Image (cartoon, rainbow, N blue to C red):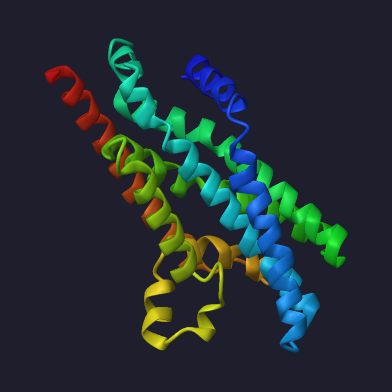
């Protein structure tokens, strides 16, 4: 697996367009949302911390899903056909690609947290930073596997709109754009079951002096299993499709 992971990391380094999608857009949104909170009379210090977590998670998820859409190109150039000839089983291929994709989620987490400190003067205790940063990064793993599943199953015509639909849908319903408390109760009930909410809520709790809830951890683990199965299924289906061709 290690040589394959190194290869994927080199490919990632050659896609600088991800910076715009995963860092610049969340950063602009962070500045915009924190200034809106001031205009509406909300506590800016609270909004700065809350939105820091939201936009860091938003950027990390976007990076993972966008990176995974490259699987469509892999199919078109015959890369999946080559992988089929290697001794790597489907689960290891999926996990290797997912681990490499995690690198795409690290930069927005670091960039948004740094921006929160420099722009809005966010100050957390050392133990909070040591918990929030790993939670925002490692907690995004389920979305890497979701992106892989979508990338394996989608076509070149449907990959981009499908990724965008899933990305925005999970982000909005999961409370990354607006707190669930501001949404209708039935929407909030659905949102609390989504992986985006569990992922962000763990860091929100720590950033405000608490600890991740067991419910959030269990929810994220359940979705991790579901998305791993989706990615493995998509990979096997892609392999069978290639074999038929």
Position of residue 189 relative to residue 114, above or below, is below
Q: Judge whether residue 123 can be spotted in this image.
A: no
User: What is the x, y in percent for residue 73?
Assistant: 38, 26
Residue at 74% x, 65% y: name it.
31
Residue occupying the point 27% across, 37% down? 155
The percent coordinates of residue 221 (x first, y second) are 42, 54
Percent coordinates x, y for residue 38 in the rendering: 77, 82
How many numbered marks appear? 0
Q: Nearer the viewer, residue 138 or 45?
A: 45
Say whether residue 149 is visible: yes
- Is residue 16 toward the left or the right of residue 157 in the image? right
Residue found at the very far front of the displayed protein? 157
Which of the pair 175/163 is nearer the observer?
A: 163
Residue located at (66% from left, 48% from top): 23
Q: Quadrant of the C terminus?
A: top left
| Residue at 35% from the left image edge and 47% from the top image edge | 227
Establish if 57 lies above or below 73. below
Q: Nearer the viewer, residue 184 or 97?
A: 184
Percent x, y of residue 101: 52, 35
Q: Residue furthest left?
A: 244
Quick check: 38 above or below 233? below
Determine whether, in the image, residue 43 is placed left or right of residue 18.
right
């Amino acid at each position: 697996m290690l040589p394959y992971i190194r290869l994927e990391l080199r490919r990632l380094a050659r896609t600088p367009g991800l910076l715009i999608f995963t860092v610049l857009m969340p950063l602009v949104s962070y500045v915009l949302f924190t200034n809106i909170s001031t205009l509406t009379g909300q506590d800016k210090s609270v909004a700065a911390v809350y939105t820091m977590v939201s936009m860091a998670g938003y950027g990390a998820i976007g990076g993972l899903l966008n990176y995974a859409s490259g699987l469509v190109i892999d199919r078109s150039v015959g890369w999946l056909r080559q992988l089929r000839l290697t001794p790597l089983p489907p689960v290891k291929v999926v996990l290797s690609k997912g681990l490499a994709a995690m690198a795409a989620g690290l930069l927005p987490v670091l960039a948004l947290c740094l921006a929160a400190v420099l722009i809005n003067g966010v100050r957390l205790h050392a133990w909070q930073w040591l918990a929030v940063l790993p939670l925002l990064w490692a907690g995004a793993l389920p979305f890497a596997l979701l992106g892989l599943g979508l990338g394996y199953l989608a076509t070149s015509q449907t990959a981009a709109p499908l990724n965008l639909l899933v990305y925005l849908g999970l982000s909005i319903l999961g409370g990354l754009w607006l707190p669930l408390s501001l949404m209708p109760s039935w929407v909030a009930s659905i949102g609390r079951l989504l992986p985006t909410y569990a992922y962000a809520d763990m860091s929100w709790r720590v950033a405000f002096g608490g600890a991740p809830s067991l419910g959030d951890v269990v929810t994220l683990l359940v979705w991790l299993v579901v998305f791993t199965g989706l990615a493995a299924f998509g990979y096997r289906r892609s392999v069978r499709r290639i074999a038929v061709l």
